Image (spheres, grey):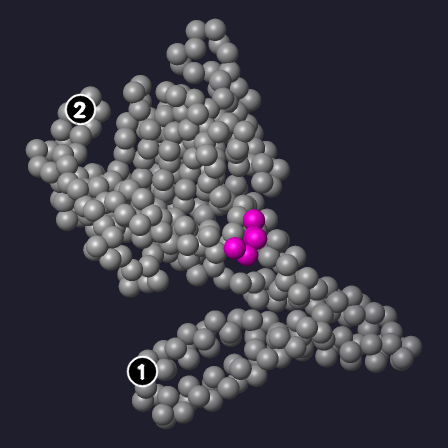
Amino acid sequence: MKASLQRRLIGLDERLDELEVRLADGDTLGDLALYRKLSREHAELQPTVSLFREFRAVAAEQAACAAMLEDADLRDLAEQEMQLTAARLAELERALQRSLLPRDPDDERNLFFEIRAGTGGDESALFAGDLYRMYTRHAERMGWQVELLSHSDGEVGGFKEVIFRVIGAQAYARLKFESGTHRVQRVPATESQGRIHTSACTVAVLPEAEEGGEITLSPADLRIDTFRASGAGGQHINKTDSAVRVTHLPSGLVVECQDGRSQHKNKAQALSVLVARLRDRQRREAHDREAAARRTLVGSGDRSERIRTYNFPQGRLTDHRINLTLYKLDAILEGDLQELSDALASEHQADLLASLGDD
């Protein structure tokens, strides 16, 4: 184990001991807010420190086995134990490295999905509908709840744009890698010559901001318009001005919500989406200032920009970021994203481990 990693773990071990003393102190017990804060920190540290204490115990066992190598009668047994302890130490070190990876504070949050048709006209809108169905089916499999917030229908089906909310444990952690341009290759239903067309949609996954978080909306910065929600063909969904359009004047961002039953609900949802977009913009600008590459940056919808390709003739999905190809497109479009999500999360974790090793 690297000396820098060991020093960090020793510090965490000492901090856990300190927390246990403070949590048992009468003054701490009398301050509920402080007690909760220290309890949370204790709960976060305990798994890592437990691994480290086991690591030190196994290392001590290995040292004892090394000393036994001097005894000819015990050498064979000592060598066997040395092999076992060495394997266990390597396993524990990997676990310790994973436990020290920086946690994304947004992982436990709900999220907003925005899918927009890009190049490809009607076929792109149809593909946007396919993606919406894929994600909602996946949410069903995961036991998450989906709320449709706003949609603009395509001329022949699908969506020009659709915005929805996903509510559930670890929803953002599992779906945050979906942001980007998704490309589809298939023969459109309207293609009489049987030629394969390429179209694209952009997907944005935005974590829902906490109430009273770092983004504060000033009423002076907002223009709020109401209008009648309408469905395909111009038919009114209702006869009242329940749909809401919120314009953030400083940034020019516009959010519409029309699928709620009341103007009040649509306004609240539109403001939530707006805050999520502003927060995402803040984060991206900060990353740009730090010259950090944002792998999940949403593209313009051009065919040449893509994170993933869905090839229907070959039944193939390829994620270009991790060079993963799966020949199970039908299952994926039915919401079976588990293998893909696991691979993306593993690659992200490997990148974090590599950066940790460079420290």
| Amino acid type indicated by mark 2 | Gly
Quarter of the rendering containing residue 170: bottom left
Q: Is residue 216 above or below residue 226?
A: below
Q: Nearer the viewer, mark 2 or mark 1?
A: 2
Residue closer to the observer: 288 or 70:
288
Q: Which residue is drawn at 41% across and 50% down?
A: 281
Numbered tag placed on residue 32 in the rendering: 1
Q: Where does residue 19 sit, x and y in percent of width and height?
A: 47, 84
Q: Is residue 171 above or below residue 245?
A: below
Q: Element under label 1?
A: helix
* Most common secondary structure along the magenta stretch: loop
Q: Where does residue 137 sit, x and y in percent of width and height?
A: 37, 37
Question: Bounds of the magenta span?
Answer: 289-293
- Does residue 10 show up? yes
Residue closer to the observer: 46 or 81:
46
| Residue density around tag 1, few if under 14, some if 14–19, many if 20 or more, within 10 Å | few
- Does residue 331 show up? no
